[in-house]
Image (cartoon, helix red, strand yellow):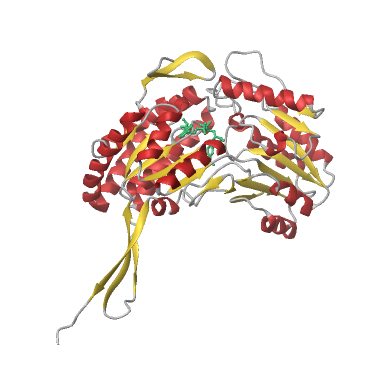
């Protein structure tokens, strides 16, 4: 990588150069924001029907280019092709969903205290600065950009350096449907992200907790609205009456699918009481998920995204071994090119061990043991994150008691921690999220400010 060129390489074959991209000088970000602000006035003047038609046409174009999009996601971030197909289908649906949201109510009317009108209306902030990670390289930029656009804003997107090809592809497909400059890319690393945070009228960030905290502080310091979606250390609570085989397969896939590189991946499996068949089945299910070519439709675990992620995962495995934990599965790396590691399952760590409390963004999960449901819920809550928890079991009373006690923003019952419905509000508690929720109807609400209008009606005589 030279000073002003950014290389994106394929994680399964680091010799494969996906693309080289000129970076945006941080000082040039203000120009992108100004151009988006000018284009925003045109966009707003188009009215709801034309804005809706633009997003609907972008959805159709993305659908028509699905095969290219899938191939690019597989190549650039190593996402297994079956999951990449799901992501592209979701990206198409996000655009068509928000195209319809263009016709949603933008305010409410209240009874005036005297005569006349009293109403509340939503208006765009101006230009949204979006900072995104690499792991959902189409869906995350779109689940921020589409509601920002439909609410009438311009957008400057700062994609992850590991997903610039996907972001460039998105701009190519969606951009022609919008006024020139309304949707722009700011390409680069942290300094470019900081420049976006320093100039946009509203900021939405998804990424790690440390970076997100800084983004929240900087945005609040400028007095602009901000939302940050960050990491997780998500638990699956397995009750004694959970079916061993089906639950093990579901939990293993939620922990290790896409090499554990999802904010919603299961990191901790909390087993309530004695359930040796489940622990054994879980080990077997994890061992069955051998890493393989992400381009093969039968693969569910591909490579880690880059060398840094690979080294972090190796360090985590060494830490587990040094802590005298039992490695139930994995612990090594296959002998093949690319940033592949074996999905690893660890038992016997203290609950306050860093591998239990901090996110390792890779295919590593720990098994923890709780004497009863109350201790399992306490254990699940005893981390600084609060994104998602799954609860597995048949006893409705126990399941509902667990749901009532958990302090995560999402709870799944007899379902994997992974998987998100783009039309429902999404977000976590504690260090997992900051600010209002995103997705669904929460999206356009975040990207607008409301004003209250009072119109007095003076009757003659
Ligand atoms: P990251 O925090 O390293 O980077 C995220 C984005 O922030 C990138 O575009 C990066 O270039 C930019 N950035 C880095 N430093 C910055 C700074 N100082 N100011 C402004 N921008 C800056 O995260 P990542 O490695 O790309 O993604 C993995 C993380 O994202 C994991 O922690 C994962 O849990 C989290 N994640 C969360 C969600 C969610 O919705 N909660 C979804 C996906 C990923």
Q: Nearer the viewer, residue 411 or 119?
A: 119
Quarter of the rendering containing residue 396:
bottom right
Does 364 appear above or below 115? above
Tell me if residue 199 can be seen. yes
Which residue is situated farthest in the bottom direction here? 461
Quadrant into which the C terminus falls: bottom left
Tell me if residue 208 can be seen. no
Q: Nearer the viewer, residue 165 or 435?
A: 435
Q: Residue 175: x, y in percent? A: 29, 35
Which residue lies at the image location 47% right of the left edge and 18% below the top edge?
Answer: 9
Q: Is residue 359 left or right of residue 5?
A: right
Q: Residue 435: x, y in percent? A: 49, 50
Q: Residue 188: x, y in percent? A: 41, 26
Which residue is situated farthest in the front direction here? 221
Which residue lies at the image location 44% right of the left edge and 53% below the top edge?
Answer: 442
Quadrant into which the N terminus falls: top left
Q: Is residue 72 left or right of residue 122?
A: right
Which residue lies at the image location 64% right of the left edge and 32% below the top edge?
Answer: 360
Give the number of callouts.
0
Q: Residue 234: x, y in percent? A: 65, 42
């Amino acid at each position: 990588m030279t000073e002003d060129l950014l290389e994106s390489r394929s994680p399964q074959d680091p010799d494969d150069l996906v693309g080289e991209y000129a970076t945006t000088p941080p000082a040039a970000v203000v120009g992108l924001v100004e151009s988006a602000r000018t284009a925003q006035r045109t966009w707003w003047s188009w009215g709801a029907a034309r804005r809706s038609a633009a997003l609907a046409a972008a959805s159709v174009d993305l659908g028509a280019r699905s095969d290219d999009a899938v191939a690019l996601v597989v190549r650039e971030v190593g996402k297994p092709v079956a999951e990449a197909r799901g992501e592209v289908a979701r990206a198409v649906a996000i655009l068509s969903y928000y195209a319809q949201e263009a016709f949603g109510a933008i305010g409410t009317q209240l009874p005036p205290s005297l005569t006349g009108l009293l109403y509340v209306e939503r208006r765009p902030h101006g230009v949204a600065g979006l900072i995104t990670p690499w792991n959902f390289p189409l869906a995350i930029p779109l689940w921020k950009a589409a509601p920002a656009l439909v609410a009438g804003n311009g957008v400057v997107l700062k994609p992850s350096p590991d997903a610039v090809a996907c972001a460039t592809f998105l701009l190519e497909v969606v951009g022609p449907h919008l006024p020139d400059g309304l949707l722009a890319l700011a390409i680069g690393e942290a300094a470019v992200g900081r420049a976006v945070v320093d100039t946009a009228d509203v900021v939405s960030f998804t990424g790690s907790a440390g970076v997100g905290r800084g983004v929240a502080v900087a945005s609040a310091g400028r007095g602009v609205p901000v939302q940050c979606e960050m990491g997780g250390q998500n638990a699956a609570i397995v009750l004694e009456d959970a079916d061993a085989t089906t639950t093990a397969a579901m939990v293993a896939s939620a922990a290790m699918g896409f090499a554990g590189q999802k904010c919603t991946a299961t990191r901790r499996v909390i087993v309530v009481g004695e359930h040796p068949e489940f622990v054994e089945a879980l080990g077997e299910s994890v061992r069955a998920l051998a890493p393989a070519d992400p381009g093969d439709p039968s693969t569910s675990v591909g490579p880690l995204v880059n060398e840094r992620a690979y080294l972090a995962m190796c360090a985590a495995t060494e830490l587990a071994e040094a802590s005298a934990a039992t490695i139930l599965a994995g612990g090594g790396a296959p002998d093949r090119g690319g940033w592949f590691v074996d999905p690893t399952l660890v038992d016997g760590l203290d609950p306050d061990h860093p591998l239990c409390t901090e996110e390792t963004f890779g295919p590593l999960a720990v098994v923890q043991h709780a004497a009863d449901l109350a201790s399992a819920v306490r254990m699940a809550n005893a981390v600084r994150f609060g994104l998602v928890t799954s609860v597995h079991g048949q006893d409705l009373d126990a399941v509902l008691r667990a749901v009532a006690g958990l302090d995560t923003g999402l709870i799944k019952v007899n379902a994997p921690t992974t998987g998100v419905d783009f039309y429902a509000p999404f977000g976590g508690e504690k260090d997992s999220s900051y600010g209002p929720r995103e997705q669904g109807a929460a999206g356009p609400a975040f990207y607008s400010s409301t004003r209250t209008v009072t119109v007095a009606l003076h009757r003659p005589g």
